[in-house]
Amino acid sequence: MTSSLPDAAQSYHSAADWQAEPEKRVILFAMSGLGKTHVSNMLRSDGTWYHYSIDYRIGTRYMGEPIEDNLKFEAMKNPYLRGLLMTDSIYIGSNITFDNLAPVSAFLGKPGSVAKGGLPMTEYRRRQSLFQTAEEAALLDTAHFINRARDLYGYPNFVCDTGGSICEWVDAHNPDDPILTALAREAVLVWIEGSEDHTAELVRRFDRAPKPMAYQPAFLEKIWAQYLAETGLPEAQVDPDAFIRYTYAAALAHRQPRYRAMADKWGVTVKAEDVARATSPQAFNDLIGQAIDARAARA
C-alpha cells in the first residue's frame, strides 16, 4: 500500500529500509522533559550524528539581540553598571549552551505583578510573538543545517531536537503546512509520547520549579482571561508563578492532541519509556525501525 505520509517518512516502508539508510535523519518532538535532548546528546556523543538544537538556534541566531538588550536594560538600572556600560568598559551577554538555555527562558518571562518578577501582559505578548517568529525561522533552518552537517563536517546522520512548543505553530491537519512540509521533506518526524505517569511527573516537576513557556496566542488569551475571572485579580496583582502553574496542566492537555496529529499524519511515534532505555545509537535506530513497522501495519 502506498503511504500517505510525505517525503522522508514515506521513503521507509519497514525497519529494514530504515536500517539500510546510510544517512539517517530524525526530528524529535515532545513536551520538554521526555528525553529529546537526552537522546540527542547520546547520539551526538557517538561521533556520527550532528545535533541541531532548535532552542539553541533561537537563542543564538534569532533572539540573541533582544536577550542581550534586556540584560543591558536591567543593568542600566544600577548606577555603577550604567556608568561602565556607557563607557564601553564592560560587556554583558548571555552564555547559552546546549545544556543551559536559561537566557531564553528568562527573556520569555512570566506575566503578572512586576513587583513579583512578572511582566505586564502587553510586554509578555510582545516577547511571545518574538519567540514564535524565532522558532518558526529556526525550524525552517533545518534543511540548511542538514546540508551543513554533511558538507562541512562530514556527519552522515542528523538529529533535530525541537522545542516543546513546535506544535503551537503548525497545523498537522493542513497537508500544505509550510513548516511540517519543509521538515518532512528532510527527515522522519518522531513523537516521543509520554504516559499518564510521565504527565503526572512533569506536572510535579513544574510545580516545584515553574519555568516560562511559549503559548499559542489563542490559548494564552483564553487561559489568561479564565485565570483573571476565577481569581478576581487585576492583571498587575497576578502572581506570575501561580499563573504559569495554573496554566501548565492545561497546556499539556492542549498540546497532546496536536502532537498526536503531527505523528499520525507526518511521522511516527515512540514511547518515552522506550527512549529512556535506548542507550546507544543502534538501540535508538532499532526503536525507530519498530515505529516504522508499526506505522506500516496500521496503513
Image (cartoon, rainbow, N blue to C red):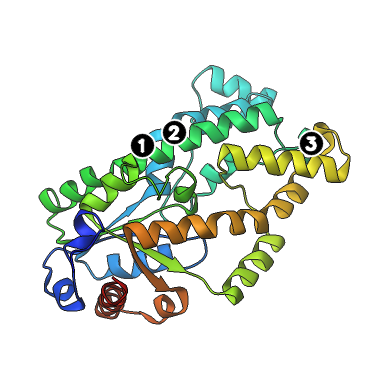
Foreground pick, 169 / 5: 5
Element under disc 1? helix
- Residue 113 — which label? 3
276 lies left or right of 151: right
Contact, CB < 8 Å: mark 1 with mark 3?
no
- Mark 1: few, some, or many residues within 10 Å (few <14, many ≥20)? some
262 lies left or right of 43: right
Q: Which quadrant would residue 41 be assigned to in this image?
A: bottom left
Foreground pick, 245 / 260: 260
- Residue 94 — which label? none
Q: Which quadrant would residue 28 be assigned to in this image?
A: bottom left
Determine which residue is flagged by label 2: 133
Element under disc 2? helix
Q: Position of residue 145 (x, y in %)?
A: 23, 47
Q: Quadrant of the N terminus?
A: bottom left
Q: Position of residue 98 (x, y in %)?
A: 41, 54
From the image, state whether disc 3 or disc 2 is nearer to you.
2
Q: In the image, is residue 240 above or below residue 287?
A: above
Contact, CB < 8 Å: mark 1 with mark 2?
yes
Q: Position of residue 119 (x, y in %)?
A: 70, 33
Query: If you read the primary sequence from the N terminus, does the residue marked by circle 1 or circle 3 appear first?
Result: 3
- Mark 3: few, some, or many residues within 10 Å (few <14, many ≥20)? some
Marks 1 and 3, how far apart at CA: 31 Å
Determine which residue is flagged by label 1: 137
> Going 60% across and 38% down the picture, which residue do you hit?
218
Q: In the image, is residue 291 above or below residue 94?
A: below
Q: Amino acid at mark 2?
A: Thr
Q: Amino acid at mark 1?
A: Ala
> Going 37% across and 45% down the picture, which residue do you hit?
174
